[in-house]
Image (cartoon, rainbow, N blue to C red):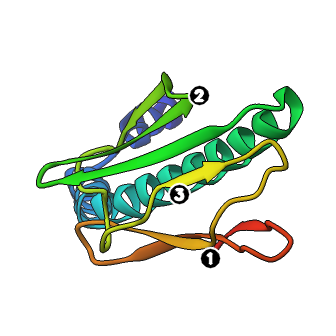
Amino acid sequence: MSALKVRGREQGFTLLEILLVLILLAGSGFYLLIKLPMNFERQHLAFQATQLLEDIRDTRQAAMAENNWYAVKFYYQAGDHHYQIFKQGKLIKNVYFKDGISFLGNPGDLTFNALGRSVGTTITLTNSLSEQKSVIVAPVGMRIREK
């Protein structure tokens, strides 16, 4: 019978064990609070660069498939960085960047003719951490890639 009483007292955790677990959880939570915002900035930049790349590729393909001209125009006023896609002068898509993402420099507008040709250009995006991603439109072969 005394063995049952001893076992009953051994079940559960001591105050020291509970405090140790809470300290470890608080430390890992603090570490995540510091690291997560930087990762979000990188992810937003990567997402916006990939979206821009896909939109430019899709626009080029549409110009060739429909035998029309398409244009991608970039707007880079302070606090309002976005681009618009036009089909023969008519607006078909308007894309605004997330907060903290902006153009680096002044990218030139793109116009794709029915053959899918356009001038070559490099469109560089940057975030609030000054990290950069570029979308490159090559004039020779019309390769469109991300760097």
Alpha carbon separation for disc pair 1 and 2: 29 Å
Q: Nearer the viewer, residue 112 or 43?
A: 112
Residue matched to label 1: 147
Residue 120 is marked as: none
Q: Between disc 1 and disc 3, whose residue precedes?
A: 3
Q: Amino acid at mark 2?
A: Gln
User: Image point 50% across, 28% down: which residue?
Assistant: 89
Q: Position of residue 94 (x, y in %)?
A: 42, 29
Where is residue 114? Give x, y as percent: 80, 42
Residue where numbered disc 3 is placed: 49
Q: Which mark is residue 88?
A: 2
Mark 1 → mark 3, Cα distance in angstroms: 9 Å
92 to the left or right of 17: right
Q: Position of residue 51 (x, y in %)?
A: 57, 46
Please report whichever mark, 2 or 3, sits nearer to the chain's N-terminal start.
3
> What is the secondary structure assignment of the residue under circle 1?
loop
Please determine whether, in this image, residue 66 is positioned above or below residue 121: above
Q: Earlier in the sequence, mark 1 or mark 2?
A: 2
Say above or below: 91 vs 14.
Answer: above
Q: Residues within 10 Å of mark 3 (few under 14, many from 20)?
A: many
- Badge 2 density bin: few <14, some 14–19, many ≥20, Cα 10 Å: some
